[in-house]
Amino acid sequence: MSIYNTTIKPKNELKPYKTISSYNNFLKQLVVGQGYETVAQQKIKALHSDVKEIISNDTNSYDFITLPSEITYEVKFDSLCLRTGFFFIEIFGYGKKSGLSVTKAQFYIICDGKYYFLIETIKLKQLVQKCNVKKTKDGSTIGFMLNRFKLIKNSLVI
C-alpha cells in the first residue's frame, strides 16, 4: 500500500473554527518552525553524504527534497511535548485537511526543541492510528496525541 493512499481516520469527528488570533499565532509559529527546518536540512545533509542539494518547498506536500535521491521530508516542531509527554500530529487545520492527512513526504522529522526524530511517514501513520484525537485550545487544529516515548522508540535521533 502506498503512503499516499493511506487515509487517516480520527476516532471522533471534531469541527474546528478559525479565528484571526489563532491564524496570527500560526504565522508566528511558522517562522519558528522554519528555523527548525533549516537545522533539519543540515542534519540530513550530514547524515547522507550523497546529498548534493536540498530544495525547500512552500506547499503542504512536503518541506524539502534532497537531490539527487529525490527524498522528501516534512519537519514539525513541538516544544509542548516536553511538558505533556505527547507530540501533536496535525491532521486537520483551519477548516481543511492538513499535516499528516495531506503530506506527500516520505519522512517526518519531529523536533522537541533539542532532539530531531526521523521516522518514515508510513510508520508514523501506523503509530497514530490508536492515538487519541484532540483539538487545540483555540479549536483551529485537530491532531493525534502521540506518546513521546513511542516516537522515540520508533524513530532515529539525528
Image (cartoon, helix red, strand yellow):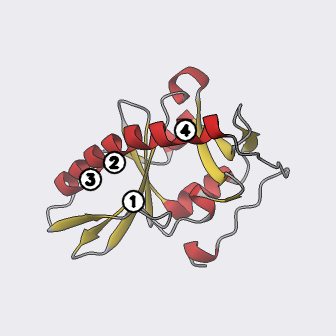
Q: Which mark is residue 41?
A: 3
Q: Nearer the viewer, mark 4 or mark 3?
A: 4
Q: Which residue is mark 4?
A: 24
Q: Quadrant of the C terminus?
A: top left
Q: Helix or strand or loop: what does disc 2 sit on?
A: helix
Residue under pointer 1: 63
Could you classify mark 4 by the number of other residues whose Cα lies within 10 Å: few (under 14), some (14-19), or many (20 or more)?
few
What percent of the width, then of the height, locates residue 139?
A: 74, 39
**What type is the residue that disc 1 sits on?**
Asp
Q: Where does the image place residue 112, in percent across and percent down from the top left?
A: 44, 33
Q: Residue at x 48, y 67 (%)?
A: 61
**Amino acid on which disc 2 is placed:** Glu
Query: Earlier along the polypeptide chain: callout 1 or callout 3?
Result: 3
Q: Which residue bears the numbered disc 2?
A: 37
Relative to 57, residue 88 above or below? above
Nearest the viewer among 19 and 91 is 19
